[in-house]
Image: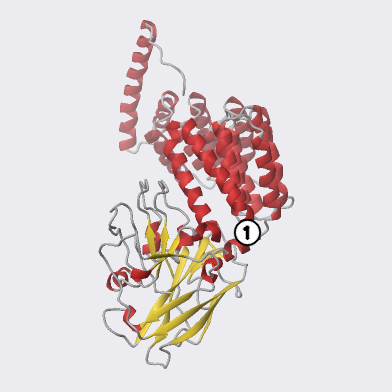
């Protein structure tokens, strides 16, 4: 058992252990002979019983007994009484083995197998489990088996939830009971069972777990459940659109020459939708395009997925424009409507129900603009600060504001109560960490006016934790970076301080996140509009996340067409450290 020191054996104990080992070797030799020769007589089966009494972890013995049972059942006629006798004998052997070792994987698995035959009393199993769980309330094998048994009965999830009440009430540190409670509540909330609406039930659950946390703040069980509750509070079941490219109100410049090294009579550019969770069903029937650009009646939408899945957070279609039409030098409005027709469904079965539309302008011209494709880029000159009042910039936070209004009142109230409560908790590492997480959740569903205040406090809390808890320094450093990037991308005021136009690269949009001590990249979905990204002089140990951006266009096209998408690390005159430069069609 964990935490129990080993002790030296006495001579008589060593002798008993040696005798037991000799008996075990003898039994194993005889048993393996029976197994190899497929001998399933009563004497052979009894031998396996003796072996399992000594060593319940003998997997081969359990498998042998399954074969023996199947052999017996094949030799008798359909006599329910005989079948029951054979299966009850197996349950007795398992029970004996579990009394030797309550955590025997093989024994629990064999019991499931026997019960799956359908001739045993499920009610007896629950009574037996009650006895076992009184002996070891946190045994996860018993809890897993309990869930299996309950699925075979008519016992309701509400009854099982009351059972977890009793188990938690007798021991706040019962992690298995808290976990089982989260499994049951997830199901009850998902199907909106009577009395289990999120805005009613989750606040009650906060009160329950508060009793555990404030009774013993050093016990981790309650903290894990509190973190799960926070996820249920923040996460909206229905999928939401978090960003798009082009963004609402933006203007993109297109030319024949931007598709390859010579002029072309036609071209295309990507249209990207980024959802907060993986969805399927994105098609020309669920996403409508209203534009005068010809050839876009039936767009083909493709998911961006490494596993060739038909569900993804990111979906891409290619919008065409044809130069043979009298369109060069003209501007065309493109209106994209999502959610007006049903069909977009999350991987969890929830429908995209928030209709949304965005409009951008495509300027098609026949001028080939030279751009620096590779080489040295100087970050010291040639940059113009982005106007904070820019229409393009203000459009970037439109989705955040609309998503924050989705069923947010009860969420805001629940999180606000938790924040007030945890401010009263004595100064502790877990208290500071939970407060930072609560404030992060509050910031995600707050108005722009107060987001900055929350993020500033979050950043200070993580700085304190880095100083207080050096053993988890890198974790705090990473989540500090995530909070900082969310702060930068959450409002036009913060974002405008990092955005520039690069005159030397056709006024490309440049986001400069240099010298921020970042160790991790986050909020990539908010960076789809960025054409140049400066990550120099940071402390990045990974660029995970940026790969999603570089995969939005086919590899062959990104290589042949630097103006559309040039990805990788680009040297600067000051440093060759962590600078990503990727270019999308000019605005």
Q: Is residue 53 left or right of residue 242?
A: left
Q: Is residue 170 left or right of residue 276?
A: right
Q: Is residue 13 in sight in this rendering?
A: yes
Q: Is residue 228 in sight in this rendering?
A: no
Q: Residue at x 62, y 45 (%)?
A: 184
Q: Is residue 473 above or below residue 302?
A: above
Q: Is residue 51 above or below residue 398?
A: above
Q: Is residue 407 left or right of residue 109?
A: right
SS at mark 1?
helix
Q: Position of residue 348 (x, y in %)?
A: 55, 58
Q: Nearer the viewer, residue 186 or 29?
A: 186
Q: Residue at x 63, y 59 (%)?
A: 404
Q: Can you say which quadrant of the picture contains the C terminus?
A: bottom left
Number of callouts: 1
Q: Nearer the viewer, residue 451 or 222?
A: 451
Residue positioned most to the front = 381
Q: Residue at x 60, y 75 (%)?
A: 341
Q: Is residue 179 above or below residue 587?
A: above
Q: Position of residue 389 (x, y in %)?
A: 55, 67
Q: Position of residue 390 (x, y in %)?
A: 53, 69
Q: Position of residue 25 (x, y in %)?
A: 32, 23
Residue under label 1, please give it: 404
Name the colour scheme. Answer: secondary structure
Q: Residue at x 41, y 41 (%)?
A: 67
Residue 229 placement: quadrant: top right
Q: Residues within 10 Å of mark 1 (few under 14, many from 20)?
A: some
């Amino acid at each position: 058992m964990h935490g129990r020191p080993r002790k030296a054996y006495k001579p008589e104990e060593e002798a008993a252990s040696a005798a037991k080992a000799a008996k075990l070797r003898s039994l194993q030799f005889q048993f393996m002979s029976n197994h190899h020769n497929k001998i399933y007589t009563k004497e052979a089966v009894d031998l396996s019983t003796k072996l399992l009494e000594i060593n319940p972890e003998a997997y081969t013995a359990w498998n042998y007994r399954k074969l023996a049972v199947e052999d017996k059942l094949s030799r008798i006629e359909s006599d329910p009484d005989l079948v029951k006798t054979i299966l009850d004998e197996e349950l007795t052997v398992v029970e004996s083995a579990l009394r030797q070792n309550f955590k025997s994987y093989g024994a629990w698995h064999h019991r499931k197998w026997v019960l799956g035959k359908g001739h045993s009393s499920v009610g007896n199993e629950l009574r037996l489990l009650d006895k076992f769980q009184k002996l070891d309330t946190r045994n996860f094998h018993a809890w897993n088996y309990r869930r299996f048994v309950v699925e075979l009965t008519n016992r309701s999830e509400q009854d099982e939830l009351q059972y977890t009440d009793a188990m938690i009430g007798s021991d706040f540190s019962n992690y298995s009971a808290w976990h089982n409670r989260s499994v049951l509540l997830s199901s009850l909330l998902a199907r909106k069972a009577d009395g289990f609406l999120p805005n009613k039930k989750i606040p009650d659950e906060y009160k329950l777990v508060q009793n555990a946390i404030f009774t013993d703040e050093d016990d981790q069980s309650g903290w894990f459940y509190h973190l799960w509750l926070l996820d249920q509070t923040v996460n909206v079941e229905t999928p939401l659109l978090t960003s798009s490219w082009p963004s609402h109100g933006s203007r993109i410049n297109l030319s024949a020459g931007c598709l390859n090294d010579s002029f072309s009579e036609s071209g295309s550019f990507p249209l990207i939708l980024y959802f907060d969770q993986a969805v399927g069903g994105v098609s020309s029937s669920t996403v409508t395009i209203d534009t005068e650009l010809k050839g876009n009646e039936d767009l083909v939408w493709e998911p961006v997925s490494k596993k060739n899945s038909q569900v993804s957070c990111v979906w891409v279609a290619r919008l065409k424009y044809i130069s043979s039409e009298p369109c060069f030098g003209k501007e065309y409005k493109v209106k994209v409507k999502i959610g007006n027709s049903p069909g977009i469904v999350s991987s969890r079965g929830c429908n995209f129900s928030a209709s949304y539309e965005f409009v951008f302008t495509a300027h098609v011209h026949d001028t080939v603009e030279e751009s620096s494709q590779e080489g040295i880029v100087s970050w010291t000159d040639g940059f113009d600060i982005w106007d904070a009042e820019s229409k393009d910039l203000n459009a970037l936070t439109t989705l955040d504001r609309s998503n924050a209004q989705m069923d947010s009142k009860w969420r805001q109230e629940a999180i606000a109560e938790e924040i007030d409560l945890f401010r009263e908790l004595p100064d502790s590492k877990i208290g500071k960490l939970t407060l930072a997480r609560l404030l992060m959740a509050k910031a995600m569903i707050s108005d722009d006016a107060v987001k900055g205040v929350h993020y500033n406090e979050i950043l200070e809390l993580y700085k304190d934790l880095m100083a207080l808890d050096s053993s988890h320094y890198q974790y705090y450093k990473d989540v500090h970076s995530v909070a900082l990037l969310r702060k930068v991308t959450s409002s036009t005021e913060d974002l405008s301080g990092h955005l520039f136009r690069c005159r030397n690269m056709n006024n490309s949009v440049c986001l400069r996140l240099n010298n921020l001590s970042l160790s991790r990249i986050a909020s990539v979905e908010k960076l789809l509009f960025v054409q140049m990204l400066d990550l120099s002089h940071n402390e990045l140990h990974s660029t995970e996340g940026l790969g999603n951006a570089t995969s939005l266009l086919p590899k062959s096209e990104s290589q042949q067409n630097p103006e559309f998408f040039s990805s990788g690390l680009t040297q600067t005159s000051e440093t060759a450290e962590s600078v990503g430069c990727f270019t999308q069609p000019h605005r």
